[in-house]
Amino acid sequence: MVNDKKHRIRIPLYAKILLGMGLGIGFGFLAIALHGEGFVHDWVAPFGTIFMRLLKLIAVPLVLVSLILGVVNLKDIRNLSRIGLKTIVIYVCTTIIAVSIGLAMVSAIKPGKLFPKDKQTEFVERYRQTVSAREADMQQVQEQSPLQFVVDMVPENLFQALGDNSKMLQIIFFALLFGVALIVVGPSKTPSIVRCVQQLNLVLLKIIDFIMAFAPIGVFALMAALIVDYSGDAGIFSALGLYALTVMLALAVVIFLVYPLIMRCFGGRTLKRFCHAVFPVQLMAFSTSSSAATLPLTMERTQKHLGVSDEVSSFVLPVGVTINMDGTSCYQAVAAVFLAQVLGLDLSFGQMLLILATATISSIGTPGIPGGSIVMLMIVLDSVGIPIEGLALILGIDRPLDMVRTMVNVTGDMTVACVVDKGNKEKSAGHEA
Ligand code: ASP
């Protein structure tokens, strides 16, 4: 028995998730072939939903606890403003790079020019209902003051914010406020609160371990359900192929060129080590389409496999999950220009710059949930006068693109965590010398 345990082969997490994904996709196609869509819907999909719920369940307490701990670990306000400012500047820079790549790619490939005019009206008609539902959200956003997004960051009731996963910015605000207050009061005067937060963090990490043990089954169920749900839309997949390819290409440049370059120059980790750490996180992001749901794994891999200090990772990652969305902003740029091309609108250089600005800002407010960027994309479209109806054309193939852009989002967060960590360690070493 003991021997048995010793010789048991440990399958790495990424392999288990990959296996779950592969089997899930295969099972989905098999179900379609055998007309077993109902079975997948009734008996398989719920496991995916349970997995997503577990991840969402842990997201809010994790952001709250790890961010408070992150701030307390920074020990003084000067450290906080230095690391905080640095993090935000790097996040904005990577977002601007990602949007620029999207704009360049879509302008060079011009996928919208290939779009048949008769298909265009057909698609708009087909999705008119979905779009009008989203339009109502958009109208609400438009009627607000330009500073509304700052106002929305401040919760009026902590418990309401905690009860709503889409209010992550409010939770971040409270966590920062609480952490700063703890530092100012002095952790020596509040040792039990600090210890309590540390211990809560340990317990949350253990819960994440439990959830991750369920990941292969959850991912299997999510993929099988996705294949069954999308089987009817094959026509749309092919009609919008070039657009999807453009998004994928732009995202591929960000993930295979920009991040490795940043990692090499400023990240202080070898590419091999980074790829090994990030791969399971990317698979999880791909399967869940949610960077918030992926956060537990992002944190674990960044700390354990990239050696990023707790003080940096517990600050940079929870903040990044909400405000750093390179994949999303890159996709928004491609989508906006693609729609302009389809509708025969020529965008000026100024309008391109406007897309750059709005895509960068709107990605900050995008929640890390599946399809989180759709309402925000409306703001980008509206800023340059592209009719929101056009969104109908791309909604049908949004999910697969969402899966890939979420992968980019989490990779960006981990890259920036390494960069900030390297700078921080160098600074500490400088102080010690
Ligand atoms: N699903 C993305 C995320 O969670 C957000 C989006 O682009 O819709 O990061």
Image: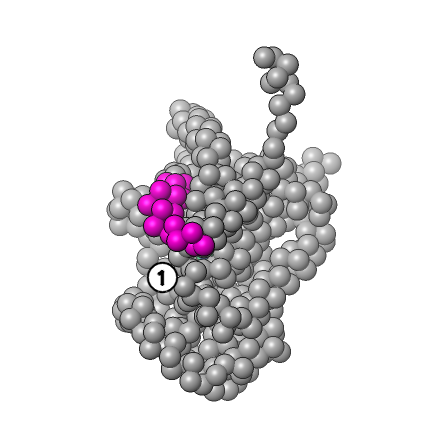
Does the magenta segment cover residue 33? Answer: yes
Does the magenta segment cover residue 320? Answer: no
Q: Position of residue 331 (x, y in %)?
A: 51, 66
Q: Nearer the viewer, residue 424 or 170?
A: 170
Which residue is drawn at the image coordinates 38% and 50% (left, top)?
36
The quadrant where residue 107 appears? bottom right
Q: How is the image coloured?
A: one colour
Which residue is drawn at the image coordinates 60% and 12% (left, top)?
2
Which residue is drawn at the image coordinates 47% and 44% (left, top)?
220
Magenta highlight range: 32-51
Quarter of the rendered structure image containing ligand 1:
bottom left
Label 1: how many residues lie within 10 Å, few (<14), some (14-19) or many (20+)? some
Q: Residue furthest front?
A: 34
Q: Is residue 317 visible?
A: no
Please state, as top left, top right, bottom left or bottom right, where the C terminus lies in the image.
top right
Q: Disc 1 designates what residue? A: 149
Q: Amino acid at mark 1?
A: Phe
Q: Position of residue 392 (x, y in %)?
A: 38, 73
Which residue is drawn at the image coordinates 45% and 64% (left, top)?
398
Magenta stretch: helix, strand or loop mostly: helix
The quadrant where residue 140 appears? bottom left
Q: Residue furthest top?
A: 2
Q: Nearer the viewer, residue 124 or 350?
A: 124
Q: Position of residue 372 (x, y in %)?
A: 40, 58
Please state, as top left, top right, bottom left or bottom right, where the N terminus lies in the image.
top right
Q: Is residue 12 visible?
A: yes
Q: Nearer the viewer, residue 116 or 384?
A: 116
Q: Position of residue 195 (x, y in %)?
A: 44, 26
Horizontally, residue 132 falls left or right of residue 227, namely: left
Query: What is the secondary structure assignment of the residue under circle 1?
Result: helix
